[in-house]
Amino acid sequence: MIKNKLVQLTEHCSWDTEEESLSLKSCYVKLTVSQKYLLGLLVQNLNRPVHSIDIFNEVNHLPSKEYNLKSVRNLVSSLRKNVPTLNIINVYGGYYMLRKDNSSPNVEFKDDLYEILDQSINPTIITNPNEFDNHIIYANKAFIELFEYTFEEVVGQNCRFLHRDDTEQLALDEIRNAIYEKKSITVNLHNYTHSGGLIYNEVAVSPIFDKKTGKIKYYLGVYKDVTTIQRLMQHFKERL
């Protein structure tokens, strides 16, 4: 339980536990009532996972109201968009966790990093190999638009969900070997959109190492849509 009145979440962002208010760079951040309940609960459990059912009960205060997972996802998503500097992560099994950011000389840049990635034209994801199934913890807007999924549908999944039943691809073995050897790799894959459309991707997978320990912290995946080129090549082969 957080006892201090002011809880520093990042160098520029703090939560007042008495006033139940959030400030960013000394400016008050306007939150909805539901967002306040959510953030208050996450701050109370800082660096600890909170189950979506507990979030639902905290926000609604109505024991008779039926649990709705989608409403929790939408609420978490709205808070992320309203205050992107907050480090709210999905934990496998329907949990969410607010992580306290460690201060560094580049905190302001770190606060903007998600915005930078989100505005990139290259579909990009970040996965965490230190959590169950190396699941996706971040997907940018370009990735969401390319594959027709929502952010909440993507986060928590392993990348294999994009392959559907097309699992006999040699490139998948190449990726698994590269991950085992902790090396970067670029391959061509068949992936599928939410509606079932086939997309040919050139995918670059890179391990991100902790400079202090040398251990892998994340994997970065950058996708390039090469569907038009592949179909054009197939067309020429058929004409020959």
Image (cartoon, rainbow, N blue to C red):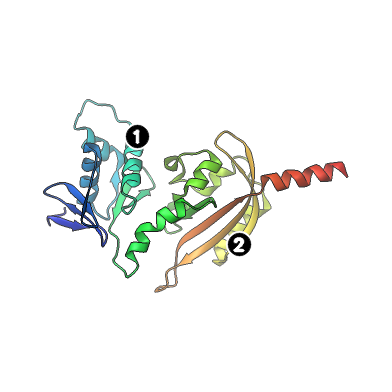
- Residue 200 position in % (x across, y down): 65, 46
Q: Which residue is mark 1?
A: 69
Q: Which residue is mark 2?
A: 185
Name the residue rendered at 35%, 38% in the picture.
73
Secondary structure under the numbered disc 2 in the rendered image: strand
Type of amino acid under label 1: Leu
Which is nearer the eye, 204 or 110? 110
Name the residue rendered at 72%, 47% in the picture.
230
Which is nearer the eye, 214 or 149? 149
Q: Residues within 10 Å of mark 1 (few under 14, many from 20)?
A: some
Name the residue rendered at 29%, 52% in the picture.
98
Secondary structure under the numbered disc 1 in the rendered image: helix
Residue 95: image quadrant is: top left
- Residue 77 position in % (x across, y down): 36, 42
Q: Residue furthest right?
A: 240
Which is nearer the eye, 26 or 74? 26
Up-down: is 13 above or below 56?
below
Q: How many marks?
A: 2
- Residue 16 position in % (x across, y down): 15, 52
- Residue 191 position in % (x across, y down): 61, 44
Name the residue rendered at 34%, 51% in the picture.
84
